[in-house]
Image (tube, rainbow, N blue to C red):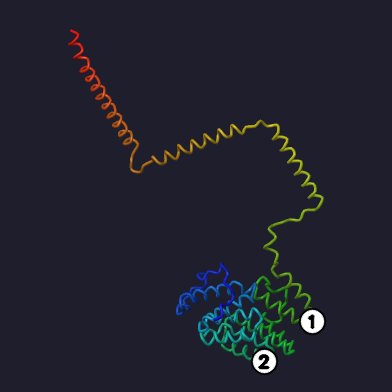
Amino acid sequence: MPSGPEIPEWADPRDLDPAVRGSLRGLEARNAQRVAAHLVVAGTLVDEDPETALAHARAARDRASRIAAVREAVGVAAYHAGDYAEAARELRAYRRMSGDEGYRAVLADCERALGRADVALRLVREALAEDPDTDEVVELRLVEAGARADLGELPAALLVVEDALGGRPRVADLDLTDETVLRLAGAYADLLAASGRRDAEEWQEAVAAAQPDEDEDVAFGEEEVPEAEAADEVQADDSAVVEADARADDEPDTSDDDDETDTSDEDDEDDEDEDDLLDLPGVSEAEIEAEVAELLAETDDAADDAGAADAAAEADDTGPEATTSG
């Protein structure tokens, strides 16, 4: 079995959708881990690097070709990579294995990309007859308009998009902040241009103005400063640095005082740490004082007993000497 592309370190099988992970339970444990990792890479890179994503999806298929989610991953990656024949083949396999009809517009678009516009139109008609949801209807209409244009039926293609936009649309009346509406308007602008219509430019300008700016997230609020103002700011900054250095030379050196302050602060912190260690839960301050007093009393009694014992010993030593001298 081919090993496939190397799995990057960031690919964590646990990031895979739980439902897909569950479908891999029938595989041997190590094999399931590798398949899951390949699927994570494929799903992560499918937009920015579809070729690499497709390579990882194929590696997963080599190890688990009977898993529907694996065939789906290959089909989606192949579609993004422009391999429409493999995309159609894999997505049909996924549909047979799972019963999911969600890729009908993609399958129709694959047929159109392969030069089979008539087949694409037939697939669109069949899908529309089954009352799909609104989002799928839009996708199917876009594929239908493209297929009509491929067949040279530009007026019919325009009618398809016009109907999707509500009929006889005016660009000023459309909400181009809606992504779906913007996609339909973009397709309509392209068809108008291909038809040589005079209003094509108006539509193209409106669509271009509504497109999200790709550099928006890189601006970070930077503002361009005129060269004269920038030079003044640099000179002002240099003057401020010179003045700060002059003030630093005039000020007395207080580094020793700072060191002493730091040392005292450290001592205070040590004391606080000791206080925290002695702060015993469940013991009141009165109890602690009583215990200390008792210990001091015992110490005093011990000292008295020791003094008495020393006095007695001294008396014993001096007694015989006094008798002899007498």
CB-based contact (under 8 Å), mark 2 and mark 1: no
Pointer 2 or 1: first along the chain: 2
* x and y, in percent, of residue 157 in the image: 71, 86
Residue 118 is labelled as: 2
* x and y, in percent, of residue 110 in the image: 64, 85
**Callout 1, which amino acid?**
Arg
- Residue lying farthest to the right in this orientation: 228
Q: Secondary structure at mark 1?
A: loop
Please tell me in which quadrant of the rendered image residue 43 appears: bottom right
* x and y, in percent, of residue 44 in the image: 59, 71
* Residue at figure coordinates x 45%, y 38% from the top left: 272
Work out whether residue 226 or residue 272 is closer to the camera in this orientation and state it.
272
* Residue at figure coordinates x 78%, y 84% from the top left: 195
* Residue at figure coordinates x 44%, y 40% from the top left: 273
Q: Is residue 285 above or below residue 198?
A: above
Mark 2 or 1: the one toward you: 2
- Residue lying farthest to the top in this orientation: 326
Q: Residues within 10 Å of mark 1 (few under 14, many from 20)?
A: few
Residue 325 is labelled as: none
Q: Secondary structure at mark 2?
A: helix
**Callout 2, which amino acid?**
Asp
Work out whether residue 85 or residue 102 is closer to the camera in this orientation and state it.
85
* x and y, in percent, of residue 138 in the image: 63, 81
Relative to residue 63, is residue 80 drawn left or right? right
Relative to residue 70, is residue 156 drawn left or right? right
Q: Is residue 1 above or below residue 126?
A: above
- Residue lying farthest to the front in this orientation: 324
Q: Tell me the residue that label 1 is attached to.
A: 197
- Which quarter of the image is occupied by the C terminus? top left
- Which quarter of the image is occupied by the N terminus? bottom right
* Residue at figure coordinates x 54%, y 80% from the top left: 70
Q: Residues within 10 Å of mark 2 (few under 14, many from 20)?
A: some
